[in-house]
Image: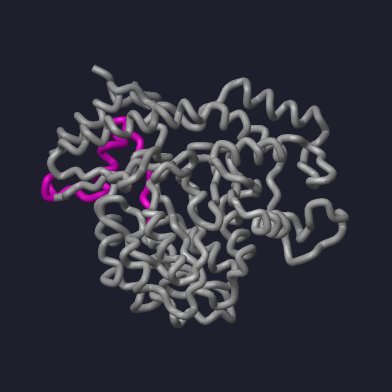
């Protein structure tokens, strides 16, 4: 019998790398070109090549690489001229960056509750959140699970709203034949250390509009214009450029990604069928129309009454003690101290928001509050394990009843 001690390395570790990554970084060091330069005067090659390769993979016309996924969202919102007092509807179940990037533009996030089965924003609730101040919708594809983008885009068009897709979890996700990130005005990505495509840090923006792409680039590179004089700054911009080191690693990781992506999707379906057979376990359901899913997270819900009234913390601890890794779940954004106590930007009127003080009471966000209390998340690299290890997870959970 395999002991808990022997299970320390039972599942794959993350990130997965080999000599190719080492060689790529060494090549950048030896080149003496440690930054990308400008479009008309390129120094290093990796940022420019990665932008082409990632755009091709995501089936987009343009890709602008940036320093992380948070500033990717901020840059897009600025490029879409979202600003002072504008409202942006966003999922309540996501990492804080989805909302803090909106705050950074002096706009106001409006939190949308989620669907209990797919765990992504409930599109049926969007229109009830639209006000005369609403300018955009930020669709978060949690765990790589697509929001119902076809319906969301129709609502946005009806109300003349911009659509940004937060694809930090969704590299490779495809919905109704189209890669996510390509449904709205732009899509943003993160390559932080835990992501399915990673360089430790880093981000990217994709879009299909030439003018928007130019504005995104300008804002991310100090207000410069492609082809313009290096020390001419045509509009507000800042330095969100990606480094050559990150891009070099990402290019090697992108070559490895398709095989990993395929295995994650195959194993996710297998695990879905097996876990769903356990009474009291409900696995995150792929949104109808999903063709491929990024699976940054693999969440499932448990009914405490079927598991001897175990708490979420106890459930996770038992899994960990058996060598099964788990990730912490995101607390609902409305409940975070900075939003509940409105410890945000000075001079911005947050009084019309649907959060803050009593408005942040959990009773106003019933679905996400319940989901958070019963949710367990397996990290994506579990899905790179062989089927025997997946069976081990299922059998262990089944025996907790």
- Where does residue 245 sit, x and y in percent of width and height? 69, 36
**Residue 382 appears in the figure:** no
Query: Can residue 308 be found in the magenta stretch?
Result: yes
- Type of colouring: one colour
Which quadrant would residue 364 be assigned to in this image? bottom left
Q: In what quadrant of the picture does the C terminus appear?
A: top left
Query: Which residue shows up at 51% across the image and 71% down it?
Result: 135
User: Observer-nearest residue: 317 or 165?
Assistant: 165
Relative to 67, does residue 378 appear above or below in the rendering?
Answer: above
User: Observer-nearest residue: 338 or 67?
Assistant: 67
User: Observer-nearest residue: 278 or 88?
Assistant: 88
Q: In what quadrant of the picture does the N terminus appear?
A: top left
The residue stretch that appears in magenta: 305-331
- Where does residue 157 sit, x and y in percent of width and height? 46, 66
Relative to 19, does residue 245 appear above or below in the rendering?
Answer: below
Query: Which residue shows up at 80% across the image and 47% down it?
Result: 38
Relative to 43, does residue 187 appear above or below in the rendering?
Answer: below
Query: Which residue shows up at 61% across the image and 35% down it?
Result: 250
Taking the image as shown, residue 144 lies to the left or right of residue 221, namely left
- Where does residue 317 sit, x and y in percent of width and height? 29, 41
Query: Can residue 40 be found in the magenta stretch?
Result: no
Which quadrant would residue 229 be assigned to in this image? bottom right
- Where does residue 221 sit, x and y in percent of width and height? 74, 55
Taking the image as shown, residue 374 lies to the left or right of residue 69, namely left
Query: Which residue shows up at 46% across the image and 64% down it?
Result: 137
**Residue 106 appears in the figure:** yes
How many circles with numbers are drawn on the protein? Answer: 0
């Amino acid at each position: 019998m395999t002991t808990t001690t022997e299970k320390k390395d039972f599942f794959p570790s993350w990130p997965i790398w080999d000599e190719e990554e080492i060689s790529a970084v060494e090549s950048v060091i030896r080149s003496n070109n440690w930054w990308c330069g400008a479009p008309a005067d390129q120094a290093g090659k990796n940022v420019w090549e990665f932008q082409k390769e990632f755009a091709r993979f995501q089936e987009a016309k343009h890709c602008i690489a940036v320093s992380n996924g948070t500033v990717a969202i901020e840059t897009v919102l600025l490029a879409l001229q979202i600003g002072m007092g504008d409202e942006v509807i966003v999922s309540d179940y996501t990492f804080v960056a989805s909302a803090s990037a909106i705050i950074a533009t002096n706009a106001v996030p409006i939190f949308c509750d989620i669907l209990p089965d797919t765990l992504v924003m409930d599109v049926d609730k969007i229109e009830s959140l639209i006000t005369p101040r609403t300018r955009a919708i930020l669709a978060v594809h949690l765990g790589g699970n697509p929001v119902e983008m076809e319906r969301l885009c129709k609502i946005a068009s009806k109300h003349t709203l911009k659509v940004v897709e937060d694809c930090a979890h969704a590299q490779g996700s495809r919905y109704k034949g189209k890669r996510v990130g390509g449904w709205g005005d732009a899509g943003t990505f993160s390559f932080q250390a835990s992501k399915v495509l990673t360089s430790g840090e880093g981000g990217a923006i994709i879009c299909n509009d030439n003018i928007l792409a130019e504005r995104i680039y300008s804002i991310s590179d100090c207000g410069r214009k492609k082809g313009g004089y290096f020390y001419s700054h045509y509009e507000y911009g800042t330095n969100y450029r990606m480094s050559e080191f990150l891009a070099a690693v990402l290019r090697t990781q992108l070559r490895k990604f398709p095989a990993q992506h395929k295995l994650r999707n195959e194993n996710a379906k297998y695990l879905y069928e097996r876990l769903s057979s356990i009474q009291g376990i409900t696995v995150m359901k792929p949104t109808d129309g999903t063709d491929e899913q990024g699976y940054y997270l693999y969440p499932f819900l448990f009914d405490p009454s079927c598991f001897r009234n175990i708490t979420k913390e106890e459930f996770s601890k038992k899994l960990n003690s058996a060598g099964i890794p788990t990730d912490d779940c995101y607390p609902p954004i409305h409940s975070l101290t900075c939003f509940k106590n409105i410890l945000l930007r000075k001079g911005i009127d947050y009084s019309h928001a649907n959060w803050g003080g009593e408005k942040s009471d959990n009773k106003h966000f019933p679905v996400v509050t319940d989901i958070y209390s019963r949710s367990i998340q397996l990290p994506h690299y579990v899905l790179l394990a062989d089927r025997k290890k997946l069976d081990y997870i299922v059998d262990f959970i089944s025996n907790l009843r």
